[in-house]
Image: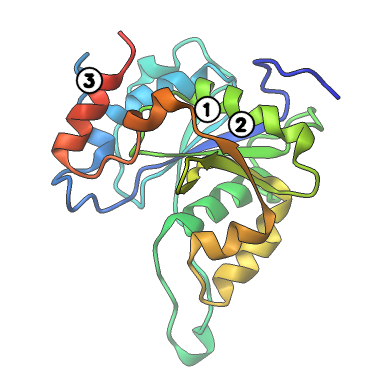
Amino acid sequence: MMGCSNSSDNLAGIVILAGGASKRMGTPKATLTLPTGEQLLNYHVRHASELQVPILIADNGRGFYVDSDATLNKPSSPVMPIADYVSDFGADNDEQIRTGGALVAIESALQTLTGSNNLFTTNNQRASWLLVMSCDSLIPATDLWQKLQQAINTAANKRVICLKDDSHLYPLLGLYHLAIEPDLKAYIDSDQRRVMHFIQPMVRTVPFTQDWQHLTNFNMPQEFEQACAALPK
């Protein structure tokens, strides 16, 4: 068994989910400002760039600005906005299904990294995982990867690795194997969008780090303030 390290050898790319409506927050979470003055999306991009892999921004066409300084001197971490995957389910009836949600963003990221038009070709044959990060978290990409990658060698035939606390799974803070792309596409094309239903047969969970409990799942301004207060100084 290979020892755990900070190496990103198994990591093909990172997708930051930033396209939610954020109705309860009152403003897009990607544009929330941290106490340091840094916007949340730039915070995630800056940490993600340390892993030296492509960074995909799934913003549902919102066109959020990413500060070029966030990836300064990180040529192996290009930042690219991606459009959600759109299923042609029902197209024969002149009705194209355009339903949002996390899975269509993840499918788009998987296609971007595996498709014939892949702009991020690599000679690293071990790069087989996509790190998925939602914008309702302040957990740095580097820390999340370090935590989740420990389960890769014991995941057996599991193709999704995500955090779990005493009562909840966190499927949008996880690793998705590139090989699931055809299955996910077929699932979406069958007009399905439920994340938990899709991952349940293939998920391997990793216990939530206690210090992270207050850093994630913020949906209202007061919850974001609490998350900021919980950030390490």
Disc 3 element: helix
- Marks 1/2 in contact by CB < 8 Å: the verdict is yes
Q: Residue at x 67, y 56 (%)?
A: 181
Q: Which residue corresponds to mark 3?
A: 229
The answer to whether residue 205 is left or right of residue 137 is: right
Q: Residues within 10 Å of mark 2 (few under 14, many from 20)?
A: many
Where is residue 168 shown, x and y percent of the image? 45, 48
Q: CA distance from mark 1 to mark 2?
A: 6 Å
Viewport quadrant of the C terminus: top left
Nearer to me, 69 or 199:
199
Viewport quadrant of the N terminus: top right
Q: Residue at x 20, y 36 (%)?
A: 223
The answer to whether residue 225 is left or right of residue 73 is: left
Q: Which badge, 2 or 3, comes first in the chain's sequence?
A: 2
Where is residue 221 shown, x and y percent of the image? 15, 38
Q: Which residue corresponds to mark 1?
A: 144
Q: Residue at x 67, y 38 (%)?
A: 129
Where is residue 78 shown, x and y percent of the image? 52, 27
Q: Which badge, 3 or 1, comes first in the chain's sequence?
A: 1
Where is residue 9 shown, x and y percent of the image? 72, 24
Q: CA distance from mark 2 to mark 3?
A: 24 Å
Kind of residue at badge 1: Leu
The answer to whether residue 51 is left or right of residue 58 is: right
Q: Quadrant of the rendered structure where residue 228 is?
A: top left
Disc 1 element: helix
Kind of residue at badge 2: Leu
Q: Which residue corresponds to mark 2?
A: 148
Q: Image height check: is 202 above or below 87?
A: above
